[in-house]
Amino acid sequence: MANTNNWNSQVINEFRTNSGKVGGPFENATLLLLTSTGAKSGQPRTTPLVYLPDGERMIIFASKAGAPTNPDWYHNLKANPEATVEVGTETFKVKAIEVAGEERDRLYNTQARLAPNFAEYQQKTTRLIPVVALERI
């Protein structure tokens, strides 16, 4: 886990230093920083995530690269749906709402067309990858 946290820290620092722009695997990706409240710890947790713009909403995907379990940030948002998002140089509050059914499938399939690795993530796991809409509050 230390490697993931160190890698995330590097991406977060690069994002904040370069007004939301990063290189490497996230170059040219729509990237946001999500700061959620830890479900168990109550501490702020910041995670870089690729998102899909959908009107006023930002759609995020609990893919965890196709792992068998959901990512920590997903559990944090289920426990505490209000969070903070950084996009570019802007920071604002959001409310997380899980998307289900046909809307979930439409959004996930759109993301998988734009970034085929998301189709691979779903194939790698038996869980249905949760889709979460972040709405500005």
Image (spheres, helix red, strand yellow):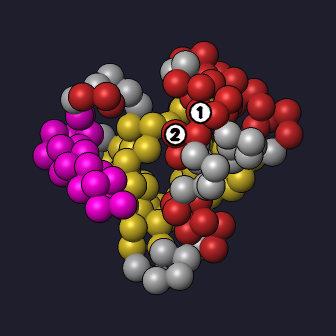
Is the residue marked by circle 1 packed among few (<14), some (14-19), or many (20+) residues within 10 Å? some
Q: Which residue is mark 1?
A: 121
- On the image, the x and y values in percent for residue 5 come to 30, 58
Dots 2, 1 in contact, CB < 8 A? yes
Q: Is residue 104 magenta?
A: no
Q: Quadrant of residue 105?
A: top right
- Camera sees residue 91: no
Q: Which residue is mark 2?
A: 65
92 displayed left or right of 70? left
Q: Nearer the viewer, residue 25 or 55?
A: 25
On screen, residue 109 above or below 35: above
Give the extent of the magenta segment: 1-22
Q: Residue at x 38, y 37 (%)?
A: 31
On screen, residue 73 above or below 51: below
Q: Residue at x 39, y 55 (%)?
A: 47
Q: Is residue 3 magenta?
A: yes
Q: Amino acid at mark 2?
A: Ala
Name the chief secondary structure element in magenta.
Answer: helix
Q: Find numbered disc 1 in the image and state the secondary structure of the residue it sits on.
A: helix
Q: Amino acid at mark 1?
A: Tyr
Q: Which mark is residue 72?
A: none
- Camera sees residue 45: yes
In whole angstroms, how far apart are the C-alphas of marks 2 and 1?
5 Å
Q: Residue at x 22, y 29 (%)?
A: 23
